[in-house]
Image (cartoon, rainbow, N blue to C red):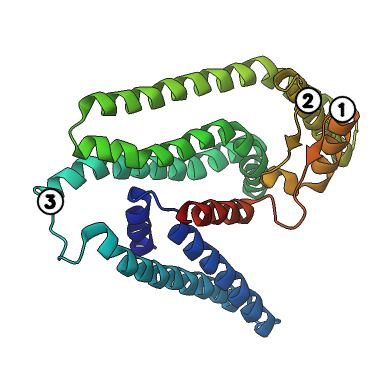
Amino acid sequence: MAVSAVLRGFFVARQRVGPNVASQLAEQAFRIGVMAAALELTAGRDIGVRCAVVLGATAASEALSAVLMAGFCKREAPRAFGHDRAQAPLHAGRRLWEILWPVGGGRCVASALHTAENMLVPACLTVYLGRRAAAVAQYGVLKGMALPLVHFPFGLLGSLGVLLMPEIARAHLQADSRRLEALLGRMLKLTMYVSALAGAVFWVWGRPLAAALCADAAAGVSPAAIARGFMDALARMALEQCRALNPDRLPVVLSGGVFLNQYLLREVTRLLEAGGFAVCTHRRVSPSDEGLALGQLAIAARAAL
């Protein structure tokens, strides 16, 4: 995995997405195929054996990805460095360290915080609920349903940071302090704006939403009805956003992993079409990440023409 990440970084710096996308598609297809075949062959065996099979398939797919990326890099090297042997820049270790330590340090801190969260939150819930099994089950619900909703706005910032990383690295290596300050300032401002907006949303609507959910549960409303009401509210929110942001009634494209939820897709489509919008949805390609990878390949192919 580490070797593949380094090789992918080479193509990110070269601003070429085709090799990265191709290797990831091959990796995922190989992983799914091997896992499906192995799990079929080990049907009825001990759960530990089947878990080992899954881990083995994951390791094999990572190895395949690394081999493919090495092949792509070998083919790309003459374009990047010519036919002469690549020469290391002066003080390469120190310059790389100056780039890597904030990234590595940030990930170490994030890992430590996640570990503390995984230990302390169940412990606190155990004190409140009195039983560790119930506490772990409740924590699973929170981590699987509530926390992704809270973290969603900041996932966009992470994606933007990855996209800007090559530009930041280039500005640093070229000692272009004005460009570096502009990029970092843009990221910090955007982080502040998104954080303030997300905080305001949860501050204003978090308590009424929680109170409404608790009131429904206390009144004996079934979990299925509560979940459906939540989905209906999301569909109405999508309609209101389109009305506010798209007054000219331009066609609306529904894409992204959220629209793997068929109920949400059906309701949003119904409301938008009733509101006078033309709606475009996926037909042959999944709206999830594999569809995104296919689109990146199409862009790369067009750029190569």
The picture places residue 104, in percent across and down from the top left corner, at: 30, 45
Instruction: Tell me the distance, in whole angstroms, between the alpha carbons under discs 1 and 2.
Output: 7 Å
Question: Quick one: SS at disc 2?
Answer: loop
Which sits in the foreground, 82 or 164?
A: 82
The picture places residue 136, in percent across and down from the top left corner, at: 62, 47
- Which of marks 2 and 3 precedes in the sequence? 3
In the rendered structure, find residue 276 and report the number of the disc placed on it. Answer: 1
Vertical order, 61 against 186 (above or below): below
Classify 10 Å Cα crowding around label 2: few (below 14), some (14-19), many (20 and above).
some
Instruction: Name, please, the residue furthest toward the front.
Output: 305
Image depth: mark 3 or mark 2 in front: 2
**Residue placed at 54% from the left, 56% from the top?**
297
Instruction: Tell me the distance, in whole angstroms, between the alpha carbons under discs 1 and 3.
Output: 59 Å
Instruction: Name, please, the residue furthest toward the bottom.
Output: 41
- Which of marks 2 and 1 precedes in the sequence? 2
Q: Is residue 46 left or right of residue 17?
A: right
Q: Is residue 12 left or right of residue 195?
A: left
The residue carrying mark 3 is 89
Q: Is residue 148 left or right of residue 236?
A: left
Vertical order, 227 against 9 (above or below): above
Which sits in the foreground, 218 or 304?
A: 304
The residue carrying mark 2 is 249
Instruction: Name, please, the residue furthest toward the left.
Output: 90
Give the amino acid type for the residue marked by disc 2 in the picture. Answer: Arg
Question: Quick one: SS at disc 3?
Answer: loop
**Residue placed at 24% from the left, 41% from the top?**
99
The picture places residue 21, in percent across and down from the top left corner, at: 50, 58
* Picture quadrant of residue 97: top left
- Mark 1 vs 3: CB contact within 8 A: no
Classify 10 Å Cα crowding around label 1: few (below 14), some (14-19), many (20 and above).
few
Question: Quick one: SS at disc 1?
Answer: loop
Numbered marks: total: 3
